[in-house]
Amino acid sequence: MPVVSTPAGDIFYLGRGRGDTALICVHGAGGTHAHWGYQMRDLSDASLIYTIDLPGHGRSTPPGRTTVAEYGAALLDMIDVLGLERAALVGHSMGGAIALWAALQAPERVAGLGLVGTGGRLRVAPAILDGLSRDLLATIRLIAAARRPSHPRWSQQGSAGDYSPDRRLFLRTDRARTDASARRGILRRMRPDRVPR
């Protein structure tokens, strides 16, 4: 198992492909490197790609961190240990906030950013935060139920077989795939010699 020892602890990662600029994919809260399986498969023909488990997640050693800055410092430590001069960072949700933090703290180390479902401020419903402190398992079940197709957010509306607008958009977006030349074009724009200064 590929694990690097950093000042933040042992961090698990998978790496595939080759190229001048590495692409590091950072998952969100509660996620793992496995959330990036399609990207690992589809982009490794055009670039060196890493998917990681943040501290306290997946196969990386505990504890998890309490701030985006602590996770961001762990990410920069990993870039150092891997011997990368620069890397393009792609982050989903909290992973995007971590990538943004890293880019602000060490812009010379970040060749580009890909941000998915994220922002500078990540709002969490107060009921979820309260539930996590009062009844962790019940809150986890609630969050998991909200992601299942049987949940009202995804439920069928109108006549049988009509999906809600949210579900139709989700299905259409999830099935969208790009060809290899489009993926290479995206990565080409992220390479250091093409990044605007």
Image (tube, grey):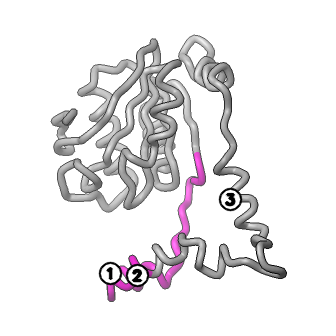
x 38%, y 37%: residue: 51
Label 2 Cα neighbours within 10 Å, binned few <14 / some 14-19 / many ≥20: some
Q: Where is mark 3, residue-wise? A: 170
* The N terminus, quarter of image: top left
Identity, as a three-letter code, of the amino acid under mark 3: Phe
Identity, as a three-letter code, of the amino acid under mark 1: Leu
Q: Nearer the viewer, mark 3 or mark 1?
A: 3
Image location (x, y in percent) of residue 96: 51, 47
Q: Measure how far apart labels 3 and 1 are at the Cα level.
A: 28 Å
Element on which disc 3 rests: helix
Magenta stretch, residue numbers: 116-141
Q: Are marks 3 and 1 in contact (CB under 8 Å)?
A: no
Label 3 Cα neighbours within 10 Å, binned few <14 / some 14-19 / many ≥20: few
179 lies left or right of 142: right
Q: Measure how far apart labels 3 and 2 are at the Cα level.
A: 24 Å
Q: Are marks 2 and 1 in contact (CB under 8 Å)?
A: yes
104 lies left or right of 10: right
Q: Where is mark 1, residue-wise? A: 136
Q: Where is mark 2, residue-wise? A: 139
Element on which disc 2 rests: helix
x 76%, y 70%: residue: 163
Image location (x, y in percent) of residue 69: 37, 50
Q: Is 137 drawn above or below residue 59 in the view shown?
A: below
Question: In the displayed image of the protein, which residue is found farthest to the bottom?
Answer: 134
197 lies left or right of 49: right
Identity, as a three-letter code, of the amino acid under mark 2: Thr
Inspect the magenta stretch and tell me whether residue 121 lies in it: yes
Between disc 3 and disc 1, whose residue precedes? 1
Between disc 3 and disc 2, whose residue precedes? 2
Inspect the magenta stretch and tell me whether residue 154 lies in it: no
